[in-house]
Image (cartoon, rainbow, N blue to C red):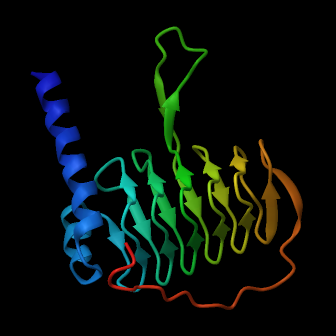
Amino acid sequence: MRHAADQLYFIALALINTLHGLLPFWLRPVLYKLCRFEVDRCATLQGGIRFFHVGRLSVGEGSLINRGVYLDNRGGISIGRQVSIAHDVRIYTMGHDPHDPSFATKAAAVQIDDHAVVFAGAMIMPGVHLGAGSVVMAGAVVTKSVPPGRMVGGNPAQDIGERGCQPAYRLKRSFWFAH
């Protein structure tokens, strides 16, 4: 019986992910509400995003999540205001413990604060906190939290300096057919 319930759950997730890519922006808030996501009306989640759970996702005002982003929200993802997440980013909140004989799962929420930027192809690992105004360079693998206003890059991500500005921009990218 448990196997059948798991199969239905993954079928429902596939349906949610497919619908998200097909629905116009003005209808997506209905899907978010049904999925128990907290997505501000001024946030933009483009088509082609893959969710891994219902609930456990909040996205603040003006934030932009581009196509191809993988949101493993099983452990919880909190994204602040005016956050820019480029295409093909992977945000993980759950994995397996390779040191555990039973290969047990372990989860830790990811928090991304206001005006943070995550460039294309980066990976954010479970438990990471990206401080306000921090920047993750393209392709970086972030395994440790990033302080506010710092830039990181590489694999594993290393500090590469200050961002050097106090972000004041407002993102607005809700184009109806930008799937």
| Image coordinates for residue 111, horizontal then vertical, percent | 57, 59
| Image coordinates for residue 159, horizontal then vertical, percent | 86, 56
- Give the left or right position of residue 145, taking residue 99 as reference: right
| Image coordinates for residue 2, horizontal then vertical, percent | 15, 23
Q: Quadrant of residue 168?
A: bottom right
| Image coordinates for residue 142, horizontal then vertical, percent | 70, 48
Residue at far top of view:
101
Q: Is residue 31 above or below residue 123?
A: below
Residue at horizontal 52 percent and vertical 8 percent from the top: 101
Residue at horizontal 25 percent and vertical 74 percent from the top: 28
- Give the left or right position of residue 26, taking residue 147 as reference: left
Q: Is residue 173 above or below residue 56?
A: below
- Quadrant location of the C terminus in the rendered image: bottom left
Residue at horizontal 28 percent and vertical 55 percent from the top: 17
Q: Quadrant of residue 9?
A: top left
- Give the left or right position of residue 101, taking residue 148 as reference: left
- Quadrant location of the N terminus in the rendered image: top left
Q: Is residue 103 above or below residue 70?
A: above
Q: Quadrant of residue 148?
A: bottom right
Task: Give the number of callouts.
Answer: 0
Residue 53 versus residue 123: which sits nearer the camera?
Answer: 123
- Give the left or right position of residue 176, taking residue 59 as reference: left
Residue at horizontal 54 percent and vertical 73 percent from the top: 80
Q: Is residue 65 above or below residue 26?
A: above
